[in-house]
Image (cartoon, grey):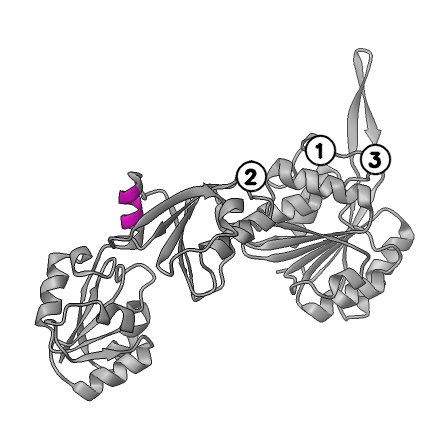
Amino acid sequence: MQVILAAAGGGTLLSMTEECRQAVWAAPCLIGARRLLESLPDEVTGQRLFATRPADILAMLQSINQDGCMVLYSGDTGFYSGTRSLIPLLEQAGISYQVLPGISSVQLLSAALGRPWQDWQLVSAHGTVCDAVGAVMQGKSTFFLTGGQLDPAALCRQLAEAGLEDLPVTVGEDLSYPSQQIRQGTAGEFAALSFQPLSVLLAEPAPNVTRRTPGFPDSLFLRGEVPMTKQEVRAAVLAKLAPQPDDILWDVGAGTGSVSVELALAASRGRTYAVECNEAACELIRANRKKLGAWNLRLVQGYAPQALLELESPDAVFIGGTKGSMEETVSVVLAANPKARICISAICIETLYRAVEALQQHDIEAEIVQINISRSKAAGSLHLMMANNPVFLIAGNCDV
């Protein structure tokens, strides 16, 4: 028995390739989604079985045991298609198969807009978790295959809530059907609209996303009267925490948000939470977030450790200030994730002691680094080296 895995393109016979059309007419049996099979002409085989789960499809094929049966998918078999899950099951069962590709929704939208899609970032929001904010921060136009609860409006709400309400977006509805419609606007406008179930979203790149190695110049940040972690210390903090692109990160006692912003940009597909209690500091965090394009940075105004209790479990945490709650804060971090990478900064001996003790209470060996920085200052035709306060970095779980 050989099975044909075919793609229906936009879902109509007209949007299929000629090879797929001929295979559909010749198939003794069709298996696929109800919407897709019921849209076919009556003259196509009457043996149509509705299934989308790979295990159910395999069971049907084994029960029928007839050569030439077709599993029909929408779009293209190579673009977020169910073929990816079915093919391993067919191979395990010893069933041979032929794959017939089709025209994807990416190609249909590209053609409708007259724009090449070769540089687009392709993301699926169909029946899966999708972070639209992280996607648009990657520097490319992003095509979202939507479906289920994450329709274009829901994705646009994510963007608008992150401050990207003015981001240009395009929605393609019922592509390849007579009712096809292309709508262009902003994420803020589309967040409140309704769209057809068969819709896709194209979002333009998020603006102002700063690309640079760790340790941004201090001059990039708005500071006001709020203390800020300086460039060289900040670079060392990021080296200890080693943020990965999809990480969830916390910055406790965020101050101006200089560390928060760098963490967010380093983990651009993840999320960073800046926890700060001072209103003036919160305003600076918002301003620096917008200035440097750290759209995936979420501000949490409040005191640690209470403000941490409802946050996502972190992969890494920077603690710059706790208002005297060091032990409780470290305990909350490690309760959320015992393997979380932790880096604590201190300028006072007493804070250093509390940080080491807090880690040791959880059987974590503290690594202590002292950073001494001097900066040059002109004095007439000469330059003097002016020392900054020494800074201690206390790290735990950061040796991997």
Q: Which secondary structure lies at badge 1?
A: helix
| Label 1 packing within 10 angstroms: few (<14), some (14-19), many (20+) | some
Residue 319: x, y in percent? Answer: 76, 54
Q: Nearer the viewer, residue 39 or 162?
A: 39
Which residue was labeled with disc 1?
A: 218
Q: Nearer the viewer, residue 122 or 185?
A: 185
Residue 33 is at least partly visible in this image = no
- The image quadrant of residue 45 is bottom left
Q: Nearer the viewer, mark 1 or mark 2?
A: 2
The amino acid marked with disc number 1 is Asp
Q: Which secondary structure lies at badge 3?
A: loop
In the drawing, does residue 74 fall left or right of residue 206? left
Residue sitting at x 31%, y 39%: 115
* Mark 2 and mark 3: Cα distance apart in space: 25 Å
- The stretch drawn in magenta includes residue 110: yes
Looking at the image, the residue that sits furthest to the right is: 350
Q: Which residues are magenta?
A: 108-112
In the drawing, does residue 176 fall left or right of residue 315? left
Above-or-below relation of 38 to 125: below
- The image quadrant of residue 271 is bottom right
Which tag, 1 or 2, sits closer to the chain's start? 2
In the drawing, does residue 322 fall left or right of residue 313? right
Which residue was labeled with disc 3?
A: 225
Circle number at residue 209: 2
Residue sitting at x 52%, y 51%: 191
